[in-house]
Amino acid sequence: MIDTLALAVALPLLGAIGATLWPRRSLPLSLVAGLATTAAALALTVEVALDGVQRSDFGGWGAPLGIALQADGLSVALLAMSNLVTLAATFYSAEYFGDKAVRRHFWPLWMLLWASLNGLFIAADLFNIYVALELLGLAAVALAALTGTRDAVSASLRYLLASLLGAITYLLGVTLLYGAYGTLDLGLLADAITSGPVAWGALTLMIGGLLIKTALFPMHFWLPPAHGNAPAPVSAALSALVVKVSFYLILRLWFDLFGPIVTPAAANLLGILGAAAILWGSWQAVMAERLKLMAAYSTVAQIGYLFLFFPVIASLEPSPARDDLIGAMVLFALSHGFAKAALFLAAGHIQQCAGHDRIDDLAGTVQRLPATSFVIALAGVALIGLPLSGAFTAKWLLLSGAIAAGQWWWVLVVLAGTLLAAGYIFRMLGKVFGFQETPYACITAVRSEVPALLLATTATLVLGLAANPLWFLLGFGDLR
Amino acid sequence: MMTQGLYIAAGLLLFFLGLWSFIMHAPVLRKLIALNVMGSGVFLIFVTFAYRGQEAAPDPVPHALVLTGIVVAVSATALALALWRRLEDQDGD
């Protein structure tokens, strides 16, 4: 029996070591390791779908002493999305980085990023999560600084400081839990935890630390410059996956670990911050002058939607209606992952061809880069949440859930956010599809455009129809 | 028990002093030192939990975790300093 849990982390790590040792062969090595990693992640997804939760205790050392990896429906849903997005961005990167020096630094860091992402999705131990979070942060910061421009380095430094603050705050929470309960295994802790000052302090510190890394308003200040100035495939991974994985950890802690002790007031606070993120992020995206900055602010807003689910879910007893909302939240996270990655890859291609990404000067893009323009339109559909996209199903469930729970104010926020999203997407599309005769000097490139196209199609068409398989994976009944 | 409480209180004090300094001071180096002070506070609390009374041997797990934490903190600080140097060099030209 091959341990797919271990492979999902070990293969990209081997790729990173290989790419460091043989810089000349880093591209083929990374491609092979990436394909193998994705295969392992998808195999794990199938195993969980067929046999339920998978767990692996390394070296035969069980908890509380050993460190375990564990995957359930929630982990593999995000793990599969994350690996498909990273794989697409990997193929895109093969074309994107022309400069040899940059390429030599890119591949080891990229594979390290991949390993820590996978490690976080299947971690079953709080300290293991801390180490993987720090690894992820270091790799992400180094990748974001890769262009070496002053803006990028300054943004990365800010990103690093925010990321370290989040991690150390999280670690203090972990410390308190270890002091009180003497174990760091998620399952054992969940059984032991009781309401009290220690659990409350740990909850506040751990969720607070992760919120900085998730860039929930008003802790989003580091995100737009870092994501807007990174190389395109890096921006795609940062926006689609790196903030998503800390959101996943919040879900894990909120529902599995602190489930019995979280209060509606805490959930409402998250909802209010989410609402502020939607309005502020969308407005900044409408005002943004550069395509990548617009996409980055759009991420701030889309993160907000994810937190809007918390107060509505908190108001419901365990029931199929509550399951539907949790499913919708995961569907929204998946949909944003695919769509935002596609948008950033397309934006990077436009930037390389046109030499800039100023939205006002994008006229004529559709004549020069028809496929990329199509990607932007498709990703836009998913970001606004128009019908057919996964985000539409998710927003629909959120709206009906909020109305059923009597929390109509969230409905207003979703409507306003959707209107603003339509505003920034159509403003961009208006320019991209505008007619202009002067041709750009770049031809349409298969390897740069196809990965983005696949991601955008997945976000819009596949996920719109994929709700039922996802519900099955999460162990819920059929979507009603 | 009393001593343990003192260590935990000192650790918390270090953590919040660092946090205060991190938020209040703009220069990158001060923020970085503040983060390290916060880290020391967390590590101090963590090793305190290893104490299991006069007779019993200390719990080895916190030691291993704190060692890992220190390694992570050192490498993160190194990366931050490298980025900061890069900025300073570019501004110097």
Image: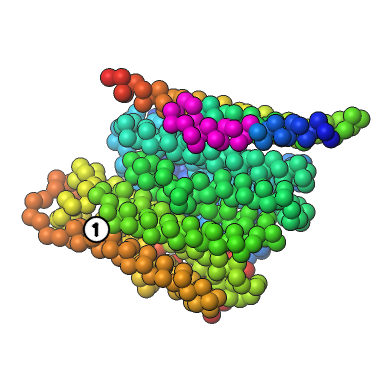
Residue B12, compared with residue A72, is above or below; it is: above
Magenta stretch: helix, strand or loop mostly: helix
Which image quarter is the C terminus of chain A in?
bottom right
Residue most extreme to the right: B55
Relative to A291, A469 lies left or right: right
> Where does residue B5 sit, x and y in percent of width and height?
78, 35
Relative to B3, A11 lies left or right: left
Front residue of this view, candidates A61 and A199: A199
Q: Quadrant of residue B41?
A: top right
Report the residue at 15% width, 55% height from top. A363
Relative to A318, A417 lies left or right: left
> Where does residue A110 sit, x and y in percent of width and height?
45, 39
Question: Which residue position is annotated with label 1?
Answer: A428
Q: Is residue B16 magenta?
A: yes
Q: Is residue A470 magenta?
A: no
Task: Decide if residue A377 is in sight here.
Answer: no
Report the residue at 53% width, 32% height from top. B21
Residue A11, compared with residue B83, is above or below; it is: below
> Where does residue A337 sit, x and y in percent of width and height?
43, 56
Front residue of this view, candidates A434 and A313: A313
Q: Quadrant of residue A28?
A: top left
Report the residue at 67% width, 36% height from top. B12
Q: Which portion, as a residue range, is magenta?
A: B14-31
* Colour scheme of the rendered structure: rainbow
Q: Amino acid at mark 1?
A: Met
> Where does residue A172 sit, x and y in percent of width and height?
65, 40
Task: Decide if residue A304 is in sight here.
Answer: yes
Residue A47, compared with residue A179, is above or below; it is: below
Secondary structure of the residue carrying tag 1 is helix
Front residue of this view, candidates A139 and A220: A220
